[in-house]
Image: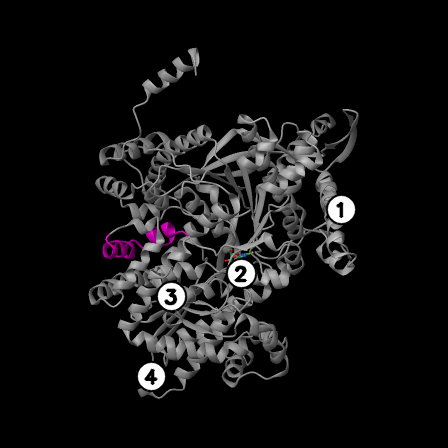
């Protein structure tokens, strides 16, 4: 800079005190200043929540400092950037994670102690940011943490929902949904960027205009909504890099429908304007099934359009040749939810930047990649053509044009194979003509990634078989991972300290493969002793939590057997519950002398059911009904307990996982694309009871079959077994457990009838009957027997943690960066 600009910058710099300081006195001063000036309470009188607010603002100041430096550095270096587009980010709480990643958690804890507060207690004041449903949304959150930690120049883009995932309230054993108006208590982690806003258009018509001797299309919208940016800093661990998650919120636009003001109906005009805000109001709570709803479509386009405008604006800030776009930009689509970004980029390049169709198409083919998270064809999104044509008329034309050339290419490749053409076409003919979003993504992305090895196999041989035959080189997989920062460092400080002590370093927090070093100590009596101690403390903490949530007392001496995840038929919570019924029945019919040999167990189940998913809701009720009987049966006492933890979310998981002995991942083989819960349990030294499905297959390879409890049909056996299940009866033990439900042993027999019918009358699609015997065997022979031998158990536990390195999202993100996105680290100097 020169002259005036330089003088100004120098003056600004001279007024700066230097970077914020992290010694205890500075931190205390900082917190108290925030109490006084941000929270507007007196520094002589404030409560835990106000202290939390002040504390998080103080942490946020430090985040902002690094975030400015990171972005200034990115701007200067101008590396290729990754833009990660996702409709869901399940971030959970931020305070502990941010303080730890900044490397100043302990300093804060000391500072707070001197003020008479406890860091842990204040951290509990924070609500969960639940801007997503389940695994797919946690995938986004874990990836952001890894991208920041590994110094990648990346941005996350999503939607800022006013209502996150519903809160689950259980009344009389039934699930009820309550809105999660999470912003009620403020959100100190975000920064509203009023100047960063874009107009997003909907409806209207497409007109042709003369242009440069030819024609061009002009979209005349019927509605315009403003997208305002909310920025959420994402700090990396062990680096100064702090990247940005930019979430869009809908506001009425100033361009909006001025006409209505002239009609005299001022009040209604204002109310109508406000409707714009509904676009970002609520997260759809159904994972995996989408019925072309207008609001959902508007949400998808709204966040995609704002993001694309932002990305192009940033590119144009320092470039004037779109041919360089693919060297500077990679766009990653998290599932098909953001796939409207494809026609949107085409539209902007052709209609607004006036590139030729061919030029624009070449660019599009180089910049997009996607991850698919689904196994079942029903999970694939379709948008009715009529709906798309009304909401986004120009995009429909573009999709048709893309499809036209694609079908031509198909004909060249396969000849006039009409069945194949109709299967592969982006446009589905039929009762409701629709756009297949997965087909659109595959056609336009250079790479399609599955989330585990077996998932890719299923994509290649079933779901996208035709496409695989056409473009084998497009299909890859990157086995999912989770971030050890949140799932070990934040949530299990005890184990974390122990690992670092025995490895002699905490470098594993950035390099999980180092955990393998624990294998050398797996049978060391001293480590075993310490390991058991840490795990026991975590179990006591979990027992206290259970008592606080449910009023039930459970003993930490019992085996804690946990299944926490969304409730789905394919995840087979029902298999778990029928196994519990069987165990209950066995204990009940035992002689007193045999009862003494039973390994006491606390079965813990948690998870939300989509509000419209009847079967899943019945499973929740069944769990409560069975629990009611077992937990109040004096014959059973402490030998068996069944606890349902309500309102399962990220924070609950952080508490439950470290305190579990066994966790269940028991989906019917071939149904769980990956599964990531298992990885979190694995890291925390909890043993897995699992089917060979999704990423579990790869976990087996890392830790060995001997260190977990495997059971059930294999992926390739499932189709045959299904046919068999249609024609054969149920195994006896299974029929008996099911009959108890049917006959009203747990009451509500009418309500549970359809649940029983789904197995007996419906051909047992998920093979509960088939897998029951081997499930019981894994539970009894393996798990119960192993638990009695604590030395062996602890060894298995240590080896689980030791073998979990591969399931760090750092590994996953590294593979994406290298193989799919073509980006390099860009590390901001300290
Ligand atoms: C999911 C898969 O069901 C799950 O197996 C996978 O681990 C996760 C992340 O890749 O994505 N797909 C959808 S939809 N929801 C999921 O959790």
Compared to 757, does 409 lie above or below? above
Q: Position of residue 484 (x, y in %)?
A: 37, 52
Q: Give the class, few, some or many, for how many residues have Cα within 10 Å of label 1's Cα (few <14, many ≥20).
A: some
Asked whether the residues under the numbered discs 1 and 3 touch, taking CB atoms below 8 Å apart as contact, a structural biologist would say no
Compare marks 3 and 4 and give the one earlier in the sequence: 4
The answer to whether residue 129 shows anywhere in this view is no
Magenta-drawn stretch contains 500: yes
Q: Nearer the viewer, mark 3 or mark 4?
A: 3
The CA span between labels 3 and 2 is 20 Å
Would you name the residue on which mark 1 appears? Answer: 404
The answer to whether residue 98 shows anywhere in this view is yes
Magenta span: helix, strand or loop, mainly?
Answer: helix
Magenta-drawn stretch contains 64: no
**Residue 440 vs residue 498, the one in the foreground:** 440
Q: Nearer the viewer, mark 3 or mark 2?
A: 3
Name the residue located 49 percent from the left edge and 84 percent from the top edge: 733
Compared to 556, does 363 lie above or below? above
Q: Nearer the viewer, mark 1 or mark 4?
A: 1
Asked whether the residues under the numbered discs 2 and 1 touch, taking CB atoms below 8 Å apart as contact, a structural biologist would say no
Compare marks 3 and 2 and give the one earlier in the sequence: 2
Compare marks 1 and 4 and give the one earlier in the sequence: 1
Asked whether the residues under the numbered discs 1 and 4 touch, taking CB atoms below 8 Å apart as contact, a structural biologist would say no
Image disc number at residue 60:
none
Q: Give the class, few, some or many, for how many residues have Cα within 10 Å of label 3's Cα (few <14, many ≥20).
A: some
Would you name the residue on which mark 4 appears? Answer: 595
Q: Give the class, few, some or many, for how many residues have Cα within 10 Å of label 2's Cα (few <14, many ≥20).
A: many
The CA span between labels 4 and 2 is 40 Å
Would you name the residue on which mark 2 appears? Answer: 673
The CA span between labels 1 and 4 is 71 Å
> From the Cβ of disc 2, is ligand 1 less than 8 Å away?
yes
Would you name the residue on which mark 3 appears? Answer: 703
Secondary structure, mark 2, is loop
């Amino acid at each position: 800079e020169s002259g005036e600009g330089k003088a100004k910058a120098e003056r600004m710099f001279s007024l700066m005190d230097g970077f914020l300081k992290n010694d205890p006195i500075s931190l205390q001063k900082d917190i108290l200043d925030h109490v006084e000036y941000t929270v507007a309470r007196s520094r002589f009188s404030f409560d835990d929540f106000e202290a939390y607010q002040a504390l998080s603002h103080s942490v946020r100041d430090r985040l902002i400092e690094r975030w400015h430096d990171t972005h200034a550095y990115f701007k200067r270096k101008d590396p290729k950037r990754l833009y990660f587009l996702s409709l869901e980010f399940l971030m959970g709480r931020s305070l502990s994670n941010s303080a730890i990643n900044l490397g100043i958690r302990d300093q804060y804890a000391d500072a707070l102690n001197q003020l008479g507060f406890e860091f842990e207690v204040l951290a509990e004041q924070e609500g969960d940011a639940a801007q997503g449903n389940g695994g797919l949304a946690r995938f986004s959150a874990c990836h952001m943490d890894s991208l920041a930690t590994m110094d990648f120049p990346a941005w996350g883009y999503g939607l800022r929902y006013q209502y996150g995932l519903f809160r689950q309230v259980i009344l009389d054993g039934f699930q009820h949904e309550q809105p999660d108006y999470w912003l009620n208590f403020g959100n100190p982690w975000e920064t509203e960027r009023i100047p960063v806003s874009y107009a997003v258009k909907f409806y209207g018509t497409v007109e042709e205009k003369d242009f440069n001797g030819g024609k061009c299309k002009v979209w005349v919208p019927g509605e315009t909504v403003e997208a305002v940016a909310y920025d959420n800093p994402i700090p990396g661990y062990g680096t100064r890099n702090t990247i940005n998650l930019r979430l869009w919120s809908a506001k009425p636009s100033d361009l909006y429908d001025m006409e209505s003001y002239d009609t005299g109906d001022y009040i209604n005009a204002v109310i109508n304007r406000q409707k714009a805000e509904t676009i970002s109001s609520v997260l759809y709570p159904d994972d995996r099934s989408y019925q072309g709803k207008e609001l959902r479509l508007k949400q998808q386009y709204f966040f995609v359009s704002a993001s694309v405008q932002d990305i192009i604006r940033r590119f144009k800030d320092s470039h004037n040749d779109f041919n360089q776009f693919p060297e500077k930009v990679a766009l990653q689509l998290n599932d098909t939810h953001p796939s409207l970004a494809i026609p949107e980029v085409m539209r902007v390049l052709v209609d607004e930047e006036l590139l030729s169709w061919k030029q624009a198409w070449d660019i599009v083919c180089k910049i997009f990649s996607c991850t698919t998270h689904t196994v079942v064809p029903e999970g694939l999104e379709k948008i009715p053509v009529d709906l798309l044509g009304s909401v986004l008329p120009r995009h429909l034309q573009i999709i048709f044009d893309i499809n036209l050339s694609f079908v031509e290419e198909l004909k060249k490749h396969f000849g006039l194979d009409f069945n194949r053409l109709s299967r592969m076409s982006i446009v589905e003919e039929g009762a409701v003509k629709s756009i297949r979003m997965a087909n659109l993504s595959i056609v336009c992305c250079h790479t399609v990634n599955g989330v585990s090895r077996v998932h890719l196999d299923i994509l290649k041989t079933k779901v996208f078989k035709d496409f695989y035959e056409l473009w084998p080189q497009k299909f890859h997989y990157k086995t999912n991972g989770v971030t050890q920062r949140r799932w070990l460092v934040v949530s299990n400080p005890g184990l974390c300290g122990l690992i670092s002590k025995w490895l002699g370093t905490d470098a594993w927090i950035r390099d999980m493969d180092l955990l393998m070093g624990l294998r050398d100590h797996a049978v060391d009596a001293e480590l075993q002793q310490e390991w058991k101690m840490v795990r026991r403390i975590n179990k006591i903490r979990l027992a206290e939590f259970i008592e606080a949530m449910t009023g039930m007392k459970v003993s930490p001496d019992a085996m804690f057997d946990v299944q926490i995840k969304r409730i789905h038929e394919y995840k087979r919570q029902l298999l778990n519950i029928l196994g519990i019924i069987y165990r209950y029945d066995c204990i009940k019919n035992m002689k007193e002398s045999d009862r003494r040999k039973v390994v006491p167990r606390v079965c813990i189940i948690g998870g939300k059911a989509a509000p419209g998913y009847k079967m899943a809701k019945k499973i929740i009720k069944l769990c409560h009904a069975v629990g009611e009987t077992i937990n109040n049966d004096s014959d059973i006492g402490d030998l068996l307990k069944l606890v349902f933890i309500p309102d399962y979310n990220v924070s609950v998981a952080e508490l439950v996982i470290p305190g579990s002995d066994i966790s269940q991942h028991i989906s019917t083989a071939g149904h769980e694309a990956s599964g990531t819960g298992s990885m979190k349990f694995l890291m925390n030294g909890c043993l897995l009871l699992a089917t060979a499905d999704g990423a579990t297959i790869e976990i087996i390879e890392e830790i060995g079959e001997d260190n977990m409890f495997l059971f059930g049909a294999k992926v390739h056996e499932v189709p045959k077994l299904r046919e068999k299940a249609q024609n054969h009866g149920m195994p006896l033990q299974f029929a008996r457990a099911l009959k108890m439900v049917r006959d009203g042993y747990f009451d509500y027999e009418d309500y549970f009838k359809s649940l029983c019918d789904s197995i007996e009358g419906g051909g047992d699609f998920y093979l509960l009957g088939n897998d029951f015997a081997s499930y019981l065997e894994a539970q009894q022979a393996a798990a119960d027997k192993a638990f009695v031998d604590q030395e062996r158990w602890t060894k298995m536990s240590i080896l689980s943690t030791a073998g979990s390195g591969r399931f760090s999202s750092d590994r996953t993100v590294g593979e994406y960066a290298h193989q799919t996105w073509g980006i390099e680290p860009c590390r901001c100097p300290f």
